[in-house]
Amino acid sequence: MSEEAVNRRLHRAAERLLDDERLQGRMTDREFQPLLDWAMATIEHAVLATVRLPDAAADVHLDAVSTAARRVVEDVDRLLAARGRGSREWSRAVRVLLEDVAAPELVRPRSSAAVRARLAATLAGWFETKRGRSACDVDASGDRLTHELARLLSETTQHPVREIL
């Protein structure tokens, strides 16, 4: 596949993610940017993993990856909105995120339990240390949380290219 064809495929895949202006949700730009960077890197990785596939098959795979990445970003938005609303809403938002982050389009099935455990530990620690802080402290922590989540997602959610080809 030519570099031009890969770039066209990447452009189409990125548009699937970026076309929805609602993706940022209630997140600030600083909260949203690391998640957007993770989602774009995930899509770029998925595009590279499809270079040997015909366009139709690649489009199916890239749609699935884009949808899964979008769900994770939306889940983090709901998680951030749940901060300060109590542990029940936080716990519900965490459960949804843990389910979506382990989607087979994002992680190898044999790795999903480990990914969930790392993410759950990160989120549990964040909630415990941030509970009861002022709104200013909670808002600032949102930036740190999304940066930390994006780093963790980058480390755990991208398939090696050879597994998809």
Image (spheres, rainbow, N blue to C red):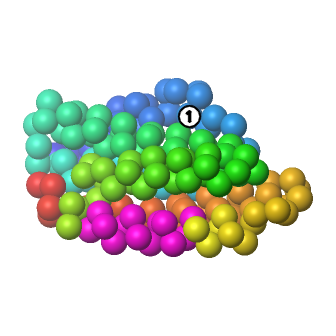
**Secondary structure mostly taken by the magenta-highlighted segment of the chain:** helix
The amino acid sitting under disc 1 is Leu
Q: Residue at x 42, y 55 (%)?
A: 98
Q: Can residue 33 be seen in this view?
A: no
Count of number-bearing discs? 1
Q: Mark 1 points at which residue?
A: 23
The reply, left or right, for residue 132 in relation to residue 38 is right
Q: Which residue lies furthest to the front in this view?
A: 88
Q: What element carries label 1?
A: helix
The answer to whether residue 60 is above or below residue 163 is above
Find residue 125 and report its horizontal and vertical position in percent: 62, 72
The reply, left or right, for residue 87 in relation to residue 121 is right
Q: Residue at x 58, y 68 (%)?
A: 124
Residue 96 part of the magenta-drawn span: no
Question: Image quarter for residue 15?
Answer: top left
Q: Can residue 132 be seen in this view?
A: yes
Residue range highlighted in magenta: 111-123
**162 and 123: which is toward the camera:** 123
**46 and 69: which is toward the camera:** 69
Find residue 110 and report its horizontal and vertical position in percent: 20, 67
The answer to whether residue 19 is above or below residue 14 is above
Q: Residue at x 41, y 70 (%)?
A: 117
Question: Image quarter for residue 78?
Answer: top right
Task: Answer few, some or many: residues within 10 Å of disc 1's Cα (few below 14, many 20 plus, some between 14 and 19).
Answer: some
Find residue 56 and report its horizontal and vertical position in percent: 14, 30
The reply, left or right, for residue 57 in relation to residue 38 is left
Q: Which residue is drawn at 39% across and 64% down?
A: 116
Residue 117 part of the magenta-drawn span: yes
